[in-house]
Image: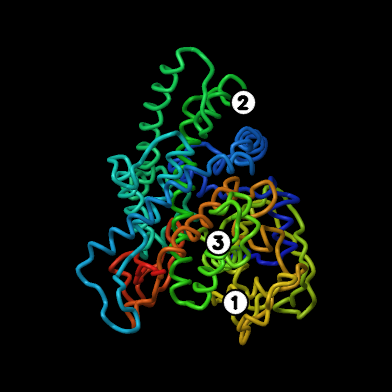
Amino acid sequence: HPDIIAISDPAALAHIHSRKAYSYTKGAYVRPLIERLMGRTLAWAEGDEHKRQRQALAPTFTHDSVRAMDSQVRGAFDKFAEAIREHIHNSKSVSTNERDKGSVYIDPMGFTSSATLDVIGSVGFGYDFQFGASAAAAKIKKSWAGLTTAGMTLAGGFIGPLVIRAFPFITDLPVEAIQAQGEIRTLIRGLGRKIVAERKAAEDGGEIRGNDLLSNLLRLQDTELRDVDLILDHISTFCLVGFETTAAVMNFALYNLAHDLPMQGRLRQELRDFVSYSNTGEPTYDEYMNKLPVLDAVVKETLRTHGSVSFADRVALEDDVIPLRFPVKHPKTGAEVRSIAVKKGQTIFISHMAVNRSRAVWGPDSEEFKAERWLAAIPGYDVASLNLTGVSPLPPPTSLCGGWNGLDTFLEGPRVCIGMKLALFELKVMLGTLIKAFEFLPVVGPDGKIQTMFSATLQPFVAGRLDEGVKVPLRVREVRE
């Protein structure tokens, strides 16, 4: 594919994501897959249709709206903590080694997805997935696991996208792996249709009440969103995009902290100090978002190193000139290149991971989790308490893209992730709940080292053992007062 241009320059990203966002669309091979998986919703829409849908959905994801989701989010992660506690107590293999005495083996992946699915079910359409125990939750998780496994094969994860890009019509063929992508959508739509019927019957022609996404969309049915099928697809999209992407980042956050015990200890102390000295007890939504600098640094660094969505393709709808903030040398003439002329139909490849981990921008430790880099940049923070040996400082703003905190994780411009505030709140509540109560430790030796591979989202597996499937090997024990 010699016609593909890979972009990571911040000015080029701003041009494509923000200034001319609707002149660069998803490729012809991508949209049919998105439609099959989620329907013609926000992730699929382009141009005026995208603007219309985003305007209709935006009120559901404001700070005030997410603040109102507080009890559902906390409830899900309280269940998470209780499930880990039960896992520890029921384990028959407790370590007696001095290094990790009292700890048991845990793979958090099943716990995190159950918790985030509970959040999405509750705030999405008022449904209780029972922390993964309901039949609907089991079906959704099984179907997603199958999709992920298929994506981690050579054919599905590497060759598949290349073939589909070259031959877009293949997405319409009755190939089982391709057609199966619609299974989760079908499951959620069926569940949603039943809930819609029950909700309307209960209201008996009166005003639809409730703060969940479904209630908000049903109230819009007579104005912006007249199509019940589209409403159900929005619920399906919210469920798919919301539960697995957030769960994936949570897994990496726990893994990173298990391998950085000083930072885990610093975070635990911050959380406990806050509860001890705060008038509100547990942090409120606003305090989680603004008053816990160590927690904030851990979340930012996890999203920098392990954002769940690794790349995006865009296709130019017209001839254009893409500006560069940092000139490059022409490979043949050596001349300085300050912009790139592209023709209509040009494919642009954007690796969010490459942007967030660029050595040229983030320094020689760009691949490493080091939350200290964010703490050291906070005015007035006790920098002397940090071990900054080998830690690169935060890059200047001019070197960074225009996304959240200079990261490309949530994109920027009109396509910035609409659920970003909820995802950040979930991440912070998860860590705030678990790190106070449990200590996560590394599995020592080759059994504890992971590699990653992009499937539907960024997936971890034990290094050299891809055949064993996705896994985050950790140990955990309760923190004693």
* Camera sees residue 341: yes
Q: Name the residue type under label 1.
A: Ser
Of 304 and 266, which appears nearest the observer?
A: 266
The x, y position of residue 89, in whole percent, is 26, 63
- Tell me if mark 1 has few (under 14), some (14-19) or many (20+) residues whose alpha carbon lies within 10 angstroms of its own: some
Say left or right for 79 vs 269.
left
Q: Residue at x 41, y 51 (%)?
A: 78
Secondary structure state at the residue bearing disc 3: helix
User: Mark 1 highlights which residue?
Assistant: 366
**Amino acid at dot 2:** Glu
**Relative depth, front residue between 273 and 242:** 273
Extreme bottom residue here? 389
Of mark 1 and mark 2, the one earlier in the sequence is 2
Question: Disc 3 designates what residue?
Answer: 276
Q: Which residue type carries mark 3?
A: Ser
Identified at 62% across, 52% down, the residue is 315
Q: Which mark is residue 224?
A: 2
Question: Residue at position x 50%, y 68% from top?
Answer: 268
